Amino acid sequence: MHLRFPARFLCLIPVFLSTPAFSAGPKIHTVALGAARRVSYTQPDATPEEKLDQTSTIKVRPLIIDGRQKEWTTGETHDITDRTFAIRRALRINDALPSDSAPRWIWQPGPWITVDRVTGHITALHLPNFDPLVSDAIWFRDYAAYCGTNTTTRGGNLYVVVAQLGARRPVVQKAIGRWPEPNHFIPVCQSAKWERLPLRVTIQPTGGQATTYDVVGTSSIIEEGDNDDSN
């Protein structure tokens, strides 16, 4: 038996079929750190004898987003919010001279990045006067405290720095000595020590005197983007 439909119903059929039953939801991103491994590490300003010593190591881990490795990292993560964390990059640098016949790859601790667990977005942090060979950033909330450096043709300084994410200027930036210094201590400064109430931080140059700084009169808004599937 053949069924006949009025023409007005037939013209509606393709329109009905072309309409999706539901719209696609937001893309879900996966963020993870892979297994750690130890690699040899040598300070770039080490003596030739020290560069021959391969006993110094650092621990590196891959940062994996959506199943693909995006960065090498070193050290521990710091949760800034429930969705954003900070971690330090690990860089693999070619240390070969122009006269060398093959690359000479070395590992170095690099700058800090933040990672958004929701969007998978990575943001490079430009911490003021941060020196990857000197600075050991110690985090509290969205503050990072460390010793930093700057150098000019007339010489430079060693600084105490407290930086806050989203702020245009450092909360604390105070010169505590000249830089570079021959035969300097390693590490140059001891790890910063934070106190919650009142909010303050203590930093001590290795072999020098500790100084405490109050962190007051500043506020910052951490911008965390909406979830999207552009990554």
Image: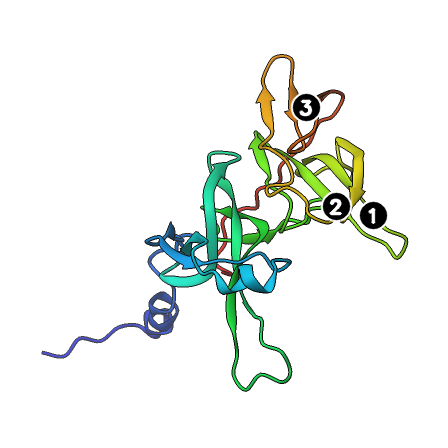
Q: Amino acid at mark 1?
A: Gly
Residue 4 x, y percent position in the rendering = 22, 76
Q: Amino acid at mark 3?
A: Ala
The reply to whether callout 3 and callout 2 are in contact (CB within 8 Å) is no
Inter-mark Cα distance, 2 to 1: 7 Å
Circle 3: element type: loop
Dot 3 or dot 2, earlier in sequence = 2
Q: Which residue is mark 2?
A: 149
- Colouring method of the image: rainbow
Residue 117 x, y percent position in the rendering = 45, 46
Farthest-out residue, front = 49
Q: Amino acid at mark 2?
A: Thr
Q: Pick the quarter of the image with the N terminus.
A: bottom left
Q: Within the image, what quadrant is residue 54 found in?
A: bottom left
Q: Is residue 75 left or right of residue 19?
A: right
Dot 1 or dot 3, earlier in sequence = 1
- Looking at this view, is 172 or 228 the one in front? 172
Farthest-out residue, top = 197
The reply to whether callout 1 and callout 3 are in contact (CB within 8 Å) is no
Farthest-out residue, left = 1
The reply to whether callout 2 and callout 1 are in contact (CB within 8 Å) is yes
Q: Which residue is mark 3?
A: 210
Residue 9 x, y percent position in the rendering = 33, 69
Circle 2: element type: strand
Q: Which residue is mark 1?
A: 156
